Amino acid sequence: MSKIKVVHPIVEMDGDEQTRVIWKLIKEKLILPYLDVDLKYYDLSIQERDRTNDQVTKDSAYATLKYGVAVKCATITPDEARMKEFNLKEMWKSPNGTIRNILGGTVFREPIIIPKIPRLVPHWEKPIIIGRHAFGDQYRATDIKIKKAGKLRLQFSSDDGKENIDLKVYEFLKVVGSQWQCLIQMIPLKGSQRHPSN
């Protein structure tokens, strides 16, 4: 039986734990016997992300921008327990968030409708699909502990050295055991480009 030729390459983002096993079976039994496809492979296991200082995640996202399509397996976003389990160098950010930040991605959530299971609101016959901008914000957040009174400043220096901005964002007064929250939202101007190192 001749295989179907897939014209363009597809980025393959391998994942963690059982998803690696399942994806390998899917490729071997359902994809590769029938398709002649150029898979651009990236190993997004937590071990490889740690070894490359998460560069492999960024590389896979830029490959997706280049080729236009990717298949991504489930990956671990490490917490403190996972850091100890895998002896990680640091608590790497969500790979999904990193990829979406580079792609400028949106997540769409669509329910699975099963005919025999009644809907909560019976006259809603079509699914409600929710699209959300799942990048930036908590996906790029950085946590720091402020233990003394002081000022939080935001600094910008242009690459050509002609512009420098120093802005006071927040002034922390005497610490009395309370929690401060400070959200800085940066929206790129239309037509601006993300730097490949980000």
Image (tube, rainbow, N blue to C red):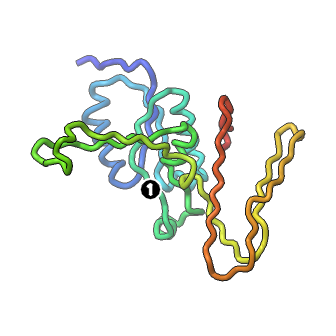
Q: Nearer the viewer, residue 94 or 127?
A: 127
Tag 1, which secondary structure? loop
Return the residue found at the far right.
Answer: 162
> Residue shown at 57%/48% (left/top)?
136
Report the side of 154 relative to 137 (left or right): right
The image shows residue 54, relative to residue 83, as above or below, that is: above
Q: Residues within 10 Å of mark 1 (few under 14, many from 20)?
A: some
Report the side of 157 relative to 183 (left or right): right
> Residue shown at 36%/48% (left/top)?
20
Query: For the residue marked with disc 1, what is the amino acid?
Result: Ile
The image shows residue 142, relative to residue 126, as above or below, that is: below
Q: Quadrant of the N terminus?
A: top left
Picture coordinates of residue 153, whole percent (x, y): 78, 59
The image shows residue 92, relative to residue 66, as above or below, that is: below
Picture coordinates of residue 118, whole percent (x, y): 14, 48
Q: Quadrant of the C terminus?
A: top right
Quarter occupied by residue 115: top left
Report the side of 93 relative to 128 (left or right): right
Q: Residue tagged by mark 1?
A: 76
Picture coordinates of residue 11, whole percent (x, y): 46, 33
Report the side of 109 relative to 119 (left or right): right
Question: How many marks overall?
Answer: 1
